[in-house]
Amino acid sequence: MTSMRLQRMPLAPPRVAFALRVLSVVLAILTAALVLWGSGHNPLALGAKVISSTFGSSFGLEDLSLLFSPLIYCGLSVAVALRIGAWNIGAEGQFNFGALCATGVALFVSGPVWVILPLMGVAGMIGGALWILVPTLARAYADVSELITTLLMNFVAMLLVYWLATGPWLDPSGMALATTSRLPVSVPAFWGIVHWGLPIAILIAIALSLFVTYTRWGYEVRIAGANPGAARYAGMPVRTQLIGIMLLSGALAGLGGMMEVAGTVGRLQGGISNNYGYIGIMVAVLARAAPIGVLATAFFMAVLLNGGIVLQSQGLTTHTVLAVTGLILLYAAIGDEAAHYKILRTKAKDG
Amino acid sequence: MISTKSLSRRGFLNMGVAAGAGYLLPKTGLISPAHAATPLAPVAEEDAHIAFGHTGPTSDEGWTWAHDQGMKAVEAAFPKLRTSYVESIPYSADATRIFRQFVADDANMVFATSNYGDFLYDVANRAPDVAFYECDGRSPLENLGTFYLSHWYPSYVAGIAAGAMSPSGKLGYVASFPVPSVYSGTNAFLMGARSVNPEATLQAIVINSWFDPQAATQAGTALIDNGCDVLFGIMDEAGYLQVAEERGAKAVMWNTDLRRYGPNAYISSIIVDFKDFYVEQVRRRLAGEWTPTQDLLPFGNGVDVDAWGESVPAEVAAKADAVKASILDGSFNPFVGELKDTKGNVKVAKGATMSEQELYHWNWSIEGVSGLDS
């Protein structure tokens, strides 16, 4: 007699993980199709519509790219923190505060565009880093869980943006509601309405990937994340690494906020972050915190979100669309976890 | 219901006559010089696609529901055309995506039932052959019109009843954002209340949303805890009415008749009706007459006060109805100075009448309102 049991492996074999990932997406889409079919829609026609609207026109591709860009920044932000074992749930807040600081520069500093734009980028990064500074120090010196502190900071940042955009920084012209004036400078577009925020995001992802793979810094971060005790024993500056990487994490989300306000939206207003910070958590987790992987999962999420918008214009409610996206992520998460297991056949002692 | 026969002189249906020659809204102050723009080309009814973008869900029994009724009226009037809608559109770049998607789906006319600002403006700017309308819009284009309601008049009338029914003289207001529709609503309501109780004050709480039943309920609770006994607001749903009912307070609502959610608390509602407006604008678009307008649907024809709630005393109702009649026949205008802001500065001189334009763009609180000016 043989019986089977499951054994969990610490690392999932990449090939199995990839196969399961593909399988889970296919299964999720099939389930969603069944649900849609059951509720009286034609899933094939809807699917074709999503694909043709997203990839079939420069319109769709531009929209996709504009979604892709902030998801990369937020995904990278969460991913780098994850490499040292820190959960940055606050990318949303850092994104908002980065956008806020960049807007401050744009509205109140005058100068040539080639000075103001980089200055806004720096302001966005400093803003993002500042917004995670307190959670970082609390984690580094008092071991306070950054999971809660970064999350709570989100609400503060969001309300700050609402307050500034509807109060002191309100567009005085009366031609726009609950928003600041249009920023006098913007990140230039290179294709249609797609601005340079996207290629810069991709370059940052590639650079980060090289750094974490090939540098001593990347190695130390990885070890400090995997086993802080051992890393400390080996003489690695665990606390310094933690502080550095968390501030970098905040800066990345802040830069994303700057690109969104200066490239896509053009004004600072409440709701500008559009939940990118929270979606960034999914992006990073699905990418297993690998910067290059973030490019793939951010693209995948952008297709999903854009598909959701197409579906809504076809008469599906937001709730249905949320359910479909949720389903796909649920299947992907199950697939990821399943990849860690292998089936062992064992002989029973006696029959 | 509102009858098109009882058109006041501010009636918007005049516009059809004036197509292509500018548009008239006598006495609203919103008359724009005639655009040089030629009307958009006509569209055959069976080829037409009319799209609606909403801020909330169509099931809200309030604002979005009322706009959805407008879409249904368009479908009934033009059964061969195609309609589509998207609900719960956030005020983010997602709004741009959705409006662009409408354009990509060959929409001939797009109605945004809330102010989406640049998110709509940028799309309209790139789609000159599509007619756009923005509710509460502020930045018109050659192909982007705006429409809204003279809701300050019914708010003033409801304020009279509220002032008479508030023993404490403390009114509460659940606000979405500090925007002109909220300033004009709070100011008009308090002015109505002060016409019967000169000591009345109004406290507002801003919840940063038009549709957030939970936050609206919390805000309503906080206002009543603070001593307010009549609530008003500009929410798309009935949340704070239920709070008022539970706590023995009164409430004035927006959009639709919501008395079943709080029969004792219900005073009235600012009733909205976009059906005639939508049907007329779609007709103009199909006929090849459409140029953008900047409309304010007038008191009595698009926006009105609802029938009074069962707890409103007859003499209070009679008094408010008399004022309503005098506003409608033009013999009385409540928005006449002297009006001071919260810091005591005179903003409208004694005897000066605020134009509809000023009322539409009202962006400061009158003396006695707290919680809006930052």
Image: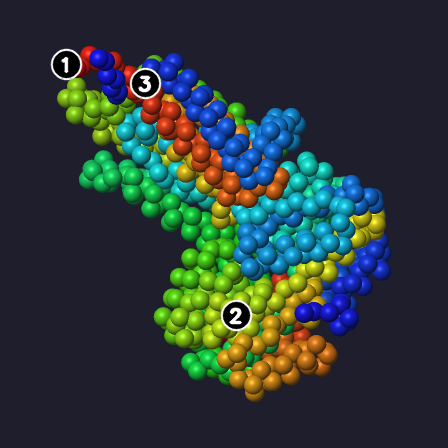
Horizontal arrangement in the rendering, residue B339 relative to residue B73 (left or right):
left
Q: Could one spot residue A246 in this view of the protein?
A: yes
Chain of the residue under label 3: A
The image shows residue B337 at horizontal and vertical percentages of 62, 77
Horizontal arrangement in the rendering, residue A290 relative to residue A201 (left or right):
left
Chain of the residue under label 2: B
Read off the residue under disc 2: B259
The amino acid beneath tag 3 is: Ala
Q: Which circle, 2 or 3, is nearer the viewer?
A: 2
Q: Is residue A330 above or below residue B304?
A: above
Q: Could one spot residue B203 in this view of the protein?
A: no
Are discs 2 and 3 both within one chain? no
The amino acid beneath tag 1 is: Lys
Q: What residue sits 51% from the left and 60% below the top? A: B237
The image shows residue B131 at horizontal and vertical percentages of 74, 46
The amino acid beneath tag 2 is: Arg
What's the distance in space between the residues labelled 2 and 3, CA to CA?
59 Å
Read off the residue under disc 1: A349
Read off the residue under disc 3: A12
